[in-house]
Image (spheres, grey):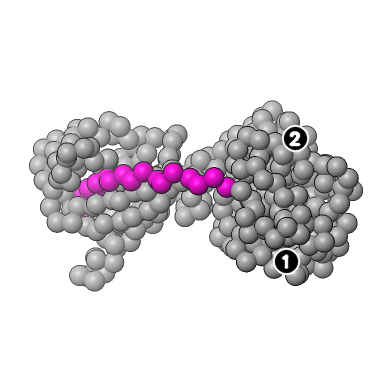
Amino acid sequence: MPQTIAAPLLAWYDQHARTLPWRGVTDAYAVLVSEVMLQQTRVETVMPYYERWMQRFPTLEALAAADLQQVLAAWEGLGYYSRARNLQQAAQMVLQDFNGVIPSDVRMLRRLPGVGRYTAGAVASIAFGRPAPALDGNIRRVLSRVFNVDEDARSAAGERRLWALATEQLSLTRPGDHNQALMDLGALICTAQNPDCAACPLASACQAFALGVQAQRPVLAPRPPLPHITVTAAVIQRDGKVLITRRPAHGLLGGLWEFPGGKQQEGEDLDACLQREIREELGATVEVGAPAGVYRHAYTHFRLTLHAFYCRLVDGEPQPIEASALQWVRLEELPDYPMGKVDRQIARRLLEERTHHG
């Protein structure tokens, strides 16, 4: 297939490129940080995190040497916390296996933790000018419309078709700008809802627009509804301190701190659930008291409702049986411990209540 989009796309980009803090940067580490942060996360959300991160960890060496708790604290609120752990491990691997130089080759980049095909292509093209395609949500949408891709964009066949198009259409002279131009076009013009086809530099080449089916592209098979999980959490206080536990290093929210508790089993009421979880996790017995709030959050693969309760220790000294650590902390110290969004809401409530009653 002839290359049809590079020239008008790049001409548009030269006039309309977004101003972003990582644009125009040739430091491969900065590009890697931005691209990992941008995985499944909106640009507007990433910008302040990126700027704070680069102030705190300005080099590979600074990130590699940092304490994991500092890394997770800097990432708090951005979600998908495995990205933060992987980014630090990638920095350590570059120092150990690549003499401190981020590789420019896509295959070598993909050896780094947390770097898949898209991120490797973005870093190789943007930081090193390598002719490597990239395929994120914005680029999928643009290519699906311009070339009227009628396969499900999430299917194996759809993936193959879109990667082939991204490769065929890539500008070999300005591959980094080309990939970023497609991202910007998808973000600004070729949006998911109500695309501004009249302003699109690719409108004359767009097959979906010619057929009037741009609103039906990309083709996305409906996803099944997310399962719902109910969990409980205990606010256990003693001597002016509250008990928090640290999750195991790997898995969902790995390494973050939380209020102890766990998932409700079928046929189990909330009090019984929380008492069982505290016995299993901490080897202690609690009396479940007043509610401390109901919190809801949607993760990628499930929805969660958390019921928190004030609890009193009645037997046993808590031990980190299932957690990687536990800590009794003063309420004003809670902001120093990295947490997921739901547990941070509980922490804020405790601080607000103390202020209100204090």
What residue is pinned by disc 1? 197
Q: Nearer the viewer, residue 124 or 347?
A: 124
User: Residue 61 in the image: x percent, y percent?
Assistant: 65, 41
Residue 64, horizontal then vertical, whole percent? 60, 39
Residue for badge 2 = 106
User: What span is colored magenta in the figure?
Assistant: 220-240
**Numbered disc 1: secondary structure:** helix
Amino acid type at circle 2 is Val
Q: Which residue type carries mark 1?
A: Cys
Q: Secondary structure at mark 2?
A: helix
Give the image quarter of residue 14. bottom right
Q: Quadrant of the C terminus?
A: bottom left
69 above or below 108? below
Identified at 69% across, 28% down, the residue is: 97
Residue positioned 25% across, 47% down in the render: 233
Q: Nearer the viewer, residue 213 or 288?
A: 213
Instruction: Please name which of the two marks, 2 or 1, marks the residue nearer to the observer.
Output: 1
The one nearer the camera, 335 or 340, is: 340
Tell me which corner region of the image, top left, top right, bottom left or bottom right, holds residue 330. bottom left
At which x and y percent is residue 51?
A: 62, 59
Identity of the residue drawn at 30% across and 56% down: 295
Q: From the top left corner, tell me how far across and down residue 23 is, in percent.
A: 74, 58
Residue 302 showing in the rendered view: yes
Mark 1: give few (<14), some (14-19) or many (20+) Cα within 10 Å: some
- The relative height of residue 214 versus residue 86 in the rendered view (above or below) is below
